[in-house]
Amino acid sequence: MEALAAKFKIYKDYSIDLIKLSAPILAGNMANMLINVGDVIVAGRHSTVTLGAISVASAIFMTFMIAAIGLMASISPVVSNLRGERKTTKTLFRATVKYSLIIGLIFCFLIRYIIKHVDVIGLTPDLYPLVVEYLDISSWGMFGGLMFMALKEFLQAYEIVVFPNLITVFQIFLNLFLNVAFVFGMWGFPELGVKGLAIASLIVRTAGGIVIFLYCLPFLKGRSRRVKTYIKELLKTGWPISFALFFEFLGFNTTAVLVGKFSSTLAAAHNVIITVTSLTYMFPMSVSNAIGIKVGFANGEKNILNVKRYSLAGVYLSVIFMGLNAIVYFLWPELLLSLFTQDKNVIAASLPVIHIVLCYLFFDGIQCACVGSLKGLKDTKPIMITMAIAYVIVGIPLGSLLAFKYNIVLMGFWTGLAVALFCACVISSTILIRKIRKLQKISS
């Protein structure tokens, strides 16, 4: 009994460490979601065409942004590992800035290339020019947006998480103010509609990049001789994360499109469920970021015991949080859904899926914690392979089979997603356990 109590105290301390680190990250992640919500609300109040245009344009833009963010996500685990090895890392600040700007340039040109081929999608005449206009302006926001993400990751490696996430919170209000001013033509500004949304997005992303750069100026000292090695390590660790995010993004967007082939009610129900689960997912995702930082530092200093304990503490936190959420989902599903829609048909279509969503969230929480540990260990290729298997080979085909062949539509697609996350959970946890055991053998 005493041994169990001692073990509980150990993991309690490690869990508190992760909570302290992940709390500001959670605030930043929630703020990011609210920025997108603000765009949708303002666009919807302007006109249906504006809302439709921003939906299509944002989907195209975010496909590239998600891939680019994956390349930025390697910065904190790589720098954390170097700090654990007691190597000088502040001199890598210049290289980090250059890395973000080069990746920003590449993705900016990719979006501008896509603009020339948007007509292939077959958009309606009223949407096409607005989507092109939005992408044309917002593509330049890649530079500021990716610099912000890169330096946020760089600061996270030093466990400096409050200030960068406060910037994100401030961006909510700046984005909302600029959206209203530019879209509706308030306070002396001309009414710009979709163009106003794009300009607001560009200003907010650029301002975020400039402010965090100024905050990081104390790091602008000296030059590193390991720049090439550092960039290679970032790309080696980052490109699998980028593809993993792409496969996950592909899974959800493909499912959304396929559900829309059946009825608008089912499409709306799917959208509501996605919104609810996305908010729930913010906690395990934030804990995953914290795990990556802590495990990265522990891995760098060859402290395999801390690698194991932070990994397990992260899994425990995710399981507990998802368990508490499951109670809310199980006892008050209608109340939860009614926060996002008052349409009784949409709520009725969503309710039967809730139990599957509970399974989905539970598996997602565990795999998310495992992914954080693997990032910290700089072993990211398995993450990419796992997501490809989970969504492309298992989730989408299974959901499509149940929906199109057996006419189990929303339930079928979410069963596919739940099974996909179950596979991801099993594969990622197995890989992590084997990795830690291997490290333990090497250290002993």
Image (cartoon, rainbow, N blue to C red):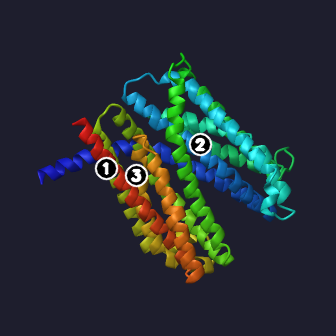
Q: Farthest residue toward the left?
A: 1
Q: Is residue 24 left or right of residue 85?
A: right
Image: 405 above or below 76: below
Q: What is the secondary structure assignment of the residue under circle 2? A: helix
Q: Quadrant of the N terminus?
A: bottom left
Residue drawn 46% across the image and 56% down it = 386
Name the residue beneath numbered marker 1. 434
* Dot 3 amino acid type: Ala
Image: 10 above or below 41: above
Q: Is residue 153 visible?
A: no
Residue drawn 46% across the image and 32% down it = 79
Residue 327: quadrant of the picture: bottom left
Q: What is the secondary structure assignment of the residue under circle 3? A: helix
- Residues 339 and 244: in front is 244
Circle number at residue 369: 3
Q: Is residue 130 left or right of residue 256?
A: right
Verify CB contact (< 8 Å) between mark 2 and mark 3.
no
Name the residue beneath numbered marker 2. 168
Gap between marks 1 and 3, in whole Å?
15 Å
Gap between marks 1 and 2, in whole Å?
37 Å
Q: Farthest residue toward the top?
A: 222
Disc nearest the viewer among 1 and 2: 1
Residue 16: quadrant of the picture: top left
Q: Is residue 342 left or right of residue 177?
A: left
* Dot 2 amino acid type: Thr
Q: Is residue 234 visible?
A: yes
